[in-house]
Amino acid sequence: MKSVWLIAGVLLSTSLFAQQKEGTIIYERKQNMHRNASEEMKAFMPEFRTTKQMLIFNEVSSIYKTVPEDEAPQPSTGGGGFVMRIGGGGNDETYFHFIEGKKLSSREILGEQFLITDSVRKEKWKLSEETKTIAGHLCRKASLRTKIANPTMRMSIGGGAPAGNQQTQAPQEKEVDVVAWFADDILSPAGPENYNGLPGVILELDIDNGGTVFSALEVQTKADAKMLKEPKKGKKVTPDGFRKALNDIMQNMGPGGMRFGGGR
């Protein structure tokens, strides 16, 4: 009997020891650019846009940012031609403090830095017993139905329309399905972009049935404390204030552009 209890104790201690409470994850973010594009628009863009993202986390906080590309594509332009802009700059980052319920997002738009203050959004995840292994970690499935901004695309070629004919549209929302796979042995509620709140860190995320997919490429066991700090730089605004500032910037750009928007 003593030997049975000894073995059980060893297994329990091993299980507890194996549980990770901090780390760094590198994701591949793959976005389907043709999902909401017309046939004319598809001719100007690849079907998928792939970037690498980094999540640094511990039990109480996380920071999420884009991994800088060695050769980031530059917007193309020409006199009276077209301009292509895709959101998500290399200086953008999002910080969460889960205990305080605080969210800070740093965004750079045309050289101007904004610091958006918000609260952590509580999602109504539905947990499942379905499992699969991702990057060497046993993960469980969770899902939810939520609203995101419907991506919008606009293009004008040949100098654009007269200023008096410009039209603006408020962002439209749509309901989408979100499927997440979270690791049982990594005890943090963190996840990519604005998705979090599960019993373990999210290693894979599918938004809108393949519209945008995050896949963990590498899971490290350490978090750099110097990087896991809330951002401080930028003009402090609320989410509504940032949307207004962004709308003003887009209007000041004038016609003759192709722009992409969307996300949460």
Image: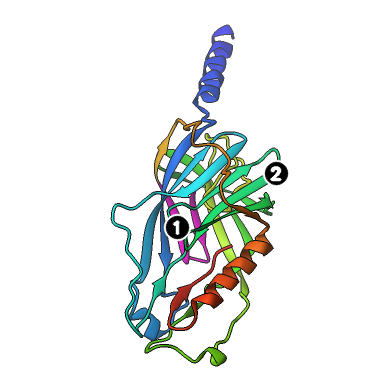
Callout 1 touching callout 2 (CB < 8 Å): no
Residue 209 in the image, given as x and y percentages of width and height: 50, 66
In the rendered view, tell whether residue 117 sits above or below residue 199.
below
Q: Disc 1 designates what residue? A: 89
Mark 2 surroundings within 10 Å by alpha-carbon count, few (fewer than 14), some (14 through 19), many (20 or more)? some
Q: Residue at x 38, y 56 (%)?
A: 51
Q: Is residue 202 visible?
A: no
Q: Residue at x 54, y 38 (%)?
A: 184
Residue 261 in the image, given as x and y percentages of width and height: 51, 70
Cα separation between marks 1 and 2: 25 Å
Secondary structure at numbered mark 2: loop
Residue 103 in the image, given as x and y percentages of width and height: 64, 48
Magenta stretch, main secondary structure class: strand
- Which label sits on residue 101? 2
State which region is magenta: 201-216
Q: Which colour scheme is used?
A: rainbow
Q: What residue type is labelled 1?
A: Gly
Task: Count every numbered label the image shows and give the total.
Answer: 2
Q: Which amino acid does label 2 sit on?
A: Gly
